[in-house]
Image (tube, grey):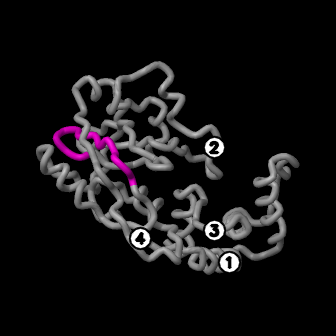
Amino acid sequence: MTEFDHIAEAYRASQGGPIADQKQQRKLYALYKQATAGDAKGRQPGFFNFEDQSKFQAWKKLTGMPRDEARHRFVQLAHRLGYRDPGDSPVDWISDQTWRREESWVNPELQQRFPCVTAPQLTRVSDDHRQLAPTLASPDDEPLAPEGDDREHLQQLEDPPDTRAFQIQAPQWPVCCRRLTVLVGYRGVDREFEDVVDRVYRVDEQESEGWKDLLTTEEPSPYGEKTLRDGLLLFYCRNCGGVYLSSHQV
């Protein structure tokens, strides 16, 4: 993949959310649209939909700009706004896509790094949970977290990688098949899990009527991907394929 492809993937995965003021956000959006879709087309958003209308107008101003030039300018602006390629996840209990989504866009002025997980707690997945949870096939090339007891799992979570972009306070981390599950949703959902997210089973509290209404934000993301509400986390067991919902403090 080209550098543009890498940054565009991170841009989509992060819900188009680099750290920037609205004017710069719209400019980056416009360059992305011009680079991927060409000249602005379709109906302009309504007058009262101000932000979408402003984005459309920013895109329309680039009419006639060649896609190659838009790609080049998108890459340049992305780097100025703080894009950095974080590479793959350094641990097997955070998915690569989640790591890139959360770590790709950082405030260039923020140099201090913090642990990405603080005060973790374990939640054991029961047989009943497994029977009720949706499952997905496990990819052959993804590493399995090692089996272990609660002490070993907590030791892993209490020695997390340092980040500048995301900190998770007091997560309830599911343990399934005697392994730490993989974080695949935090302020966003890894795309391959979207088809099961409405059927996911919540393991950190007793199921109550209507909790599924809290699963995703009311507003769809700019790229059609689902976004978790504040305080919710999505996990995946690479061993048995179970997909679980849990929570953290905000």
Residue 73 appears in which quarter of the rendering?
Answer: bottom right
User: Which of the two labelled residues, at mark 2 and mark 3, occupies the earlier sequence position?
Assistant: 3
Q: Position of residue 174 (x, y in %)?
A: 28, 40
Distance (Cα) linking label 4 and label 1: 25 Å
Helix, strand or loop status at disc 3: loop
Q: Amino acid at mark 1?
A: Asp
Q: Is residue 82 above or below residue 16?
A: below
- The mark total stands at 4
Distance (Cα) linking label 2 and label 1: 29 Å
- Between marks 2 and 3 in the image, the one whose residue lies nearer the viewer: 3
* Residue drawn at 70 percent across, 75 percent down: 70
Q: Which mark is residue 20?
A: 3
Helix, strand or loop status at disc 4: loop
Magenta-tinted stretch: 168-180
Q: Amino acid at mark 4?
A: Pro
Q: Is residue 206 above or below residue 137?
A: above
Report the front residue among 193 and 58. Answer: 58
Distance (Cα) linking label 4 and label 2: 26 Å
Mark 3 residue crowding within 10 angstroms, few (<14) / some (14–19) / many (20+): some
Write down the residue under mark 2: 220
User: Which of the two labelled residues, at mark 3 and mark 4, occupies the earlier sequence position?
Assistant: 3
Q: Are marks 4 and 2 in contact (CB under 8 Å)?
A: no
Q: Which residue is situated farthest in the right direction here?
A: 47
Residue 28 appears in which quarter of the rendering?
Answer: bottom right
Q: Amino acid at mark 3?
A: Ala
- Between marks 4 and 1 in the image, the one whose residue lies nearer the viewer: 4
Q: Position of residue 25 (x, y in %)?
A: 68, 66
Write down the residue under mark 4: 86
